[in-house]
């Protein structure tokens, strides 16, 4: 059997925005009218854990009202011809719900909680029991917190992400401003000569990055253009 080429995709808020998922820092540093650092930082969680739990309870409720869009589904379609690995900055589960086989979350997962004392202990929330509080305990008895990588915390999966990017035969960036590090630095880890595609309606500068094709489009339209390019139709 012929081995499939490896296609690694780095996705940001732009791919989920078309499904109706609210993105943070859209308006003056606010996320759903909350200052981002108040609800998405380690300091914010220490200062007011009840508010942070409430905030992510609301985000889970919102997530249940949206569905994967055509861009998420197009990535699944590419699995017919490529070994596709998705590295996402998003905390939603839309890639998984669309059917992507390999998804690595850099910034945590909204539908999961983890132990405060033992960070490697993670539980997936049941659809009927999505609300948590500072008093929520896991099945192991530990107090739990949102399974989110807050600002001021390290990104534990970044090394795995770098390893995947090093293996890529094609690298794609979708819906990200290329300013949130360390995720933004992944494009610098692509091997020389590997084609890079960058899909965004308002793309950041790619000066100094070789072998990059910028597709100035939304995620859904950009994925249609990318699929044609990969299949030699352009």
Image: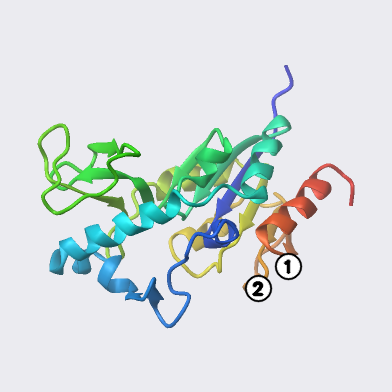
Give SS at disc 2.
Answer: loop
- Quick one: label 2 or label 1, which is nearer the N terminus? 2
* Label disc, if present, on residue 72 of the rendered structure: none
Which residue shows up at 56% across the image and 59% down it? 188
180 vs 197, left or right, is left
Q: How is the image coloured?
A: rainbow
Q: Position of residue 76 (x, y in %)?
A: 64, 38
Looking at the image, do the residues carrying marks 2 and 1 touch, with CB atoms under 8 Å apart? Answer: yes
Quadrant assignment, res 56: bottom left
- Which residue is situated farthest in the top direction here? 1
160 vs 172, left or right, is left
Give SS at disc 1.
Answer: loop
Which residue shows up at 52% across the image and 35% down it? 102
Q: CA distance from mark 2 to mark 1?
A: 7 Å
Q: Note whether 26 is above or below 134 in the view shown.
A: below
Residue placed under numbered mark 1 in the picture:
216
How many residues crowd mark 2 within 10 Å: few (<14), some (14–19), many (20+)? few
227 vs 169, left or right, is right
- Which residue is situated farthest in the bottom direction here? 28
Q: Nearer the viewer, residue 119 or 62?
A: 62
Residue placed under numbered mark 2 in the picture:
202
Q: Position of residue 58 (x, y in %)?
A: 33, 58
Q: Position of residue 116 (x, y in %)?
A: 16, 48
- Which residue is situated farthest in the right direction here? 233
195 vs 109, left or right, is right
How many residues crowd mark 1 within 10 Å: few (<14), some (14–19), many (20+)? some
Q: Position of residue 62 (x, y in %)?
A: 42, 56
Q: Nearer the viewer, residue 105 or 179?
A: 105
Which residue shows up at 55% across the image and 33% down it? 101
Which residue shows up at 46% across the image and 43% down it? 104
């Amino acid at each position: 059997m012929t081995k499939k080429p490896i296609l690694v995709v780095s996705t940001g808020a732009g791919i989920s925005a078309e499904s109706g998922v609210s993105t943070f820092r859209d308006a003056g540093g606010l996320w759903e009218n909350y200052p981002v650092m108040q609800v998405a930082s380690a300091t914010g969680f220490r200062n007011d854990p009840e508010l942070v739990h409430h905030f992510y309870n609301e985000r889970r409720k919102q997530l249940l009202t949206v569905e994967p869009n055509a861009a998420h589904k197009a990535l699944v379609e590419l699995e017919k011809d490529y070994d596709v690995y998705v590295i996402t900055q998003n905390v939603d589960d839309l890639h998984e719900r669309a059917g992507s086989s390999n998804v690595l979350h850099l910034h945590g997962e909204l539908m999961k909680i983890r132990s405060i004392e033992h960070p490697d202990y993670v539980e997936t929330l049941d659809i009927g029991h999505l609300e948590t509080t500072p008093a929520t305990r896991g099945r192991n008895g530990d107090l739990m917190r949102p399974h989110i990588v807050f600002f001021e915390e390290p990104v534990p999966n970044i090394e795995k992400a770098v390893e995947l990017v090093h293996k890529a035969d094609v690298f794609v960036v979708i819906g990200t401003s290329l300013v949130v590090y360390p995720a933004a630095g992944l494009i610098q880890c692509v091997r020389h000569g590997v084609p890079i595609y960058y899909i965004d309606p308002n793309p950041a500068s790619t000066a100094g990055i070789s072998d990059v094709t910028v597709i100035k489009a939304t995620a859904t339209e950009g994925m249609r253009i990318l699929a044609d390019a990969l299949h030699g139709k352009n």
